[in-house]
Image (cartoon, rainbow, N blue to C red):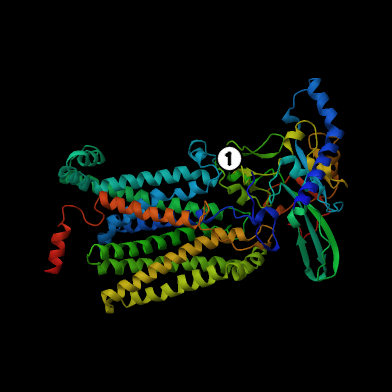
Amino acid sequence: MGDELTRRGFLGAAGGLVVALGLGPKSGEGAESGQPEYNWEDFSYVYLIDAGRCIGCGMCVQACQRENKVPDGFFRTWVERYRIGEGGRVEVDSPNGAINGFPATIVDFRVTKGLFVPKLCNHCKNTPCTQVCPVGASYTTKDGVVLVDDKRCIGCGYCVQACPYGSRYLHPVTHVADKCTWCYHRITKGLKPACVMACPVGARAFGNMKNLQDPVRKIIATEPVLVLQPELLTRPNCYYKGLDKEVR
Amino acid sequence: MIPEIRLPEVVGFAFPNDVHITWSLMIVLYPYLTGIVAGAFVISALYHLFGKEELQPISRFSMATSFAFMVVATLPLLNHLGHPERALNIIFTPNFSSAMAGFGILYNTYLLILLLEVWFVWRKDIILLARRSRGLKRKIYAAMALWTYDISPQAMEKDHSAIRVLTAIGIPAACMLHGYVGFLFGALKANPWWSTPLMPIIFLASGMTSGVAMLIILYQIAMKLSGQRIDGETIASLNRWLWLFMIVTVSLELLEIITLAYEKSEAWEAIHPLLTTKLAFSFISVQLVLGSLIPFILLMIAVTMNRYLHDRVRNTLSFVSALLLLIQVFAMRWNVVIGGQLLSKSFRGFRESYSPQLFEKEGILAAVGIFCLAFIALFVFARILPVFKGLEEPQRASLEAEIKG
């Protein structure tokens, strides 16, 4: 257990270091040179996952836990492994959210296709979670991010029940609803979410639909993409490439 | 310090955040309490508004029961909230798109109606008690009477009109309060085990069942303890109502399952194994067989063969059926609230069965304690105001003498 924690701590620290080296100076410059203030009217964030690229390493989950101090046993993001065989045989797992990747286990059928599917809050445009919040503690920002005001949340758990994607949980320490924020503290400074930065294969991408040159926007506009559980009409802002029908 | 979370075993695949039971035993208890509130109120309404004279002996008692359970109904919710100190935000800064935001309005409206009705029903007794008492006791009763001592026939007539009007508003209010609890579950599209427009109606019907059942039990116990005669007509009438309400309840519950099964929807593929594995005991054995089939037969005997039954047999049949139906309704609440959370939204797996601990914050002891508080509230009510007979009628001692003589 101790070793595992140390290892996780090291990896997280390493991830943080990479982030700091890669983008630290840029944000520093902004702060010092009086960069124009962040205007949320200029942004409409969108997230794109290429399931075909994901290798299930779990770096994103680790980066998220590290960046957002997510308590053990709870997940703002996780990765699912789908092993699909003929005749409708499907085996799905996500051991501890795949924070340490996936063990090489064997299934009792011939796997004809397999994929890793990263999951996180879909930051739906028509979101059931903010709808049901009795005190308005869950809300959508103008730049399209679904957040929880932890000073206002009463911890009733209704939003946790209302989210069809299992993206929310009640934080065991603060006793308020908690969820993926797309690293709002980072993206409003021009950085990418920690999970996007940590992905070694570019399976996760983050963009701005209001930026006409945004590559993510271009992919969503011009290539076949899917959302999770579209029948619920929650209108997610997370889009997927390379998804299978077995994925919910 | 992060508390250690014991991760439950999962059968199949559950979304990683789905393995926690967010709504605990407290959320099972809350609709159980409001159901009894609504059911007991309806019995008092049957006398006050619909002229069911045979229910007169328990008309006051049913209102007192409704009131006592109403007073404690919020406690499970407060105990459940992560931040109970912010609970009033629901009332002061509600987000009206939330079904839960209606809570403050519905709960307070119904509480106000109930409070007013209790006042009008007991006004005469309060005044008589104020006149008979001395010192502080007198002051308290006088304050309860709002320092108005008018019990002239005209005033009494106005009281009766007020009671009728309040009951007429109270019935929809009680139905709204409890139906809305069903709506909280029924309007969540994320959970197929909850998401059905039948849910509020099922909650209402089962609420009526539990309310009548609770009255039968409390009435019989109260009469036994005070050495009074159990009114056969009243019990026979309560039996008929209980039978009707339970038939409606169980039919609706079965219809919901049958519809899901017949549609063979994606939801059914997840719910079917839930009912036959995780909920096999609490759903099939307790809710359907022990809690529905057996009392159905017992009540059928009690209702259809009423005139051939000895009082003791009728009372026993009634008592046992009521007890079983109280268990049935609790099992139904459990199967809905907990069952819905055992099922992962992945539709591919279940959480390991949830068993609340005895001493945890939202555990068994807390639930039993809150439930008992309702009886204590009723007991206190009965100490302050007479819950069976008004004061102008013969006092208990002389009545007993009459019966014995």
Placement of the C terminus of chain A among the 4 image quadrants: bottom right
Q: The residue tagged with tag 1: helix, strand or loop?
A: loop
The answer to which quarter of the image holds residue A40 is top right
Q: How many marks?
A: 1
Viewer-proximal residue among B120 and B281? B281
The location of residue B226, given as percent across then percent down, is 24, 62
Residue found 16% across the figure and 56% down from its top: B393
The location of residue B314, given as percent across then percent down, is 30, 74
Viewer-proximal residue among B283 and B396? B396
Viewer-proximal residue among B298 and B21? B21
Query: What chain is tagged by disc 1?
Result: A
In the figure, is residue A188 to the left or right of B172?
right
Residue B97 makes an appearance in the image = yes
A145 versus B362 height, above or below: above
In the figure, is residue A20 to the left or right of B373?
right
Which residue in the rendered view is the most extreme toward the left? B405
The answer to which quarter of the image holds residue B148 is top left
User: What residue did someone put label 1 on?
Assistant: A153
Which residue in the rendered view is the most extreme toward the bottom? B308
A212 versus B397 height, above or below: above
Q: Amino acid at mark 1?
A: Cys
Residue found 81% across the figure and 20% down from its top: A33
In the figure, is residue B241 to the left or right of A120?
left
Which residue in the rendered view is the most extreme toward the front? A2
Mark 1: few, some, or many residues within 10 Å (few <14, many ≥20)?
many
Residue A35 makes an appearance in the image = no
The location of residue B189, given as percent across then percent down, is 62, 54
